[in-house]
Amino acid sequence: MTDIDTVTTSNAVRLSGRQWLGLGALGAAVYFLLPALWTRIERFETGSDYRIPFALGNDYWLFDRWTRKAAETHDVLVLGDSVVWGHFVGSDQTLTHHLNALSGRERFANLGLDGSHPAALAGLVDYYGSGIRNKTVVLQWNPTWMQSLEQDLRDPELRRERTFPYNHERLIPQFSPSIPCYRENASRRIGHAMDRHLPLAAWTRHLQVAYFRIHNEPKSIPEWTIEHPYENPLSQITLRLGPADDRLEEPIPWTERGIRKTNVPWVDLEGSIQWAQFRRAVHVLRSRGNRLLVVVGPFNEHMLQEKSLERYLALKGAVVNWLRAESVPHMVASVLPSETYADASHPLDRGYQFWARELLGHEFFNGTKTTGSPALPAR
């Protein structure tokens, strides 16, 4: 027997306890510091009238970064869905643009996110809005999400037959309360819930959404390289996040779109998922020391048939009663002229102008009682 037959060889490396601790410390440093370091490397150009680009609407790491920057540079943060974001107008025609124009400076920041129904907005504020703290905040309540059981995410037919195609599934409650229209498997639910508390996961998602897209869908780097086998993935990371003017649809009044008056069924506040989640958003914002103003509407009441309008007015009254009972400062926006709406809830440029004048005239901002905007025409 030769010496080589009796020698046991191995490529394994044994680490001492101190070495394991050092390796763990290095891993933790990379895990927690890399996302923070990235904000110093990646150029985030906002400029005047900035809003999160539509293509980056699922980049919640970027939203968190924008809220922190906006909190440092603006006096008032305006939160909401596509109505605040400005679905039918350019970035220089949004509510915040007109508020700033009337104020004479950049006071108001657009934190609207297209498609962020209340269940998503509550999660957005809770998990990715920690920078919204000790600020003046305007939060819009858009009643469009309570037009039906389907919009309220609790249609029993959808639960039995299919998954409802709604927005921002990563933000909604994954387990409790139960969302009847949400039928995702347990492993993905757990993954979504964990991602909210893991900085590296949100940052990784940011890279996918901002730089690695296939057919406008974010992909992991391995998935992207399969579609682009001869391209260097590092060349995709440009380290620049410039502003984008994302008017999504033509600014045409609803009356010219062929939209007719509708009989919206509406849902009651009691048992409503979207209303419960809106209240959660209010609670989170107030618990962080923010000075909050809730704006109710302005919904396009011109579109509603008589019975539907009666139900809507009752719903709006119930919302106002809750806000009063909870001592939440609020404003019921006046109904805008019919021709200034693009659809049921989205104003056009002139509509945002009227709305901005009325909002700035509210006692919340000037300390005096107002009965409405003198510049607002009669219905």
Image (spheres, grey):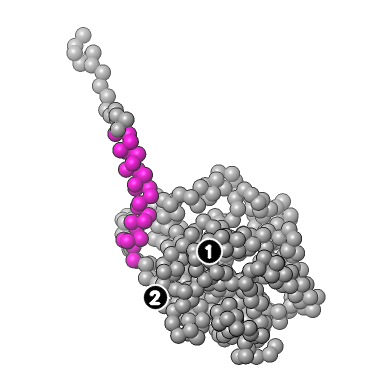
Q: Residues within 10 Å of mark 1 (few under 14, many from 20)?
A: few
> Of residues 14 and 155, which is closer to you in this image?
14
Is residue 321 something that shows in the picture? Answer: yes
Residue 261 magenta-highlighted = no
Q: Within the image, what quadrant is residue 121 found in?
A: bottom right
* Residue, far top: 1
The amino acid pointed to by label 1 is Gly
Residue 44 at x, y percent in the picture: 37, 67
Say which quadrant the N terminus sits in.
top left
Q: Within the image, what quadrant is residue 355 found in?
A: bottom right
- Residue at the spot 45% in from the left edge and 54% down from the top edge: 202
- Residue at the spot 53% in from the left edge and 50% down from the top edge: 192
Q: Is residue 360 above or below residue 238?
A: below
- 362 sits left or right of 149 in the view: left
In space, the residues marked 1 and 2 are separated at their CA atoms by 27 Å
Residue 27 magenta-highlighted = yes
Residue 229 at x, y percent in the picture: 35, 53
Residue 47 circle label = 2
Say which quadrant the C terminus sits in.
bottom right
Provide the major secondary structure of the magenta segment.
Answer: helix
* Comes first in the chain, label 1 or label 2: 2
- The residue that mark 1 highlights is 289
Q: Is residue 53 above or below residue 284?
A: below
Residue 218 at x, y percent in the picture: 46, 58
Q: Which residues are magenta?
A: 19-43
> Of residues 237 and 103, which is closer to you in this image?
103
Q: Secondary structure at mark 1?
A: loop
> Of residues 52 and 155, which is closer to you in this image?
52
Count of numbered tags: 2
- Residue at the spot 23% in from the left edge and 13% down from the top edge: 6
Residue 151 circle label = none
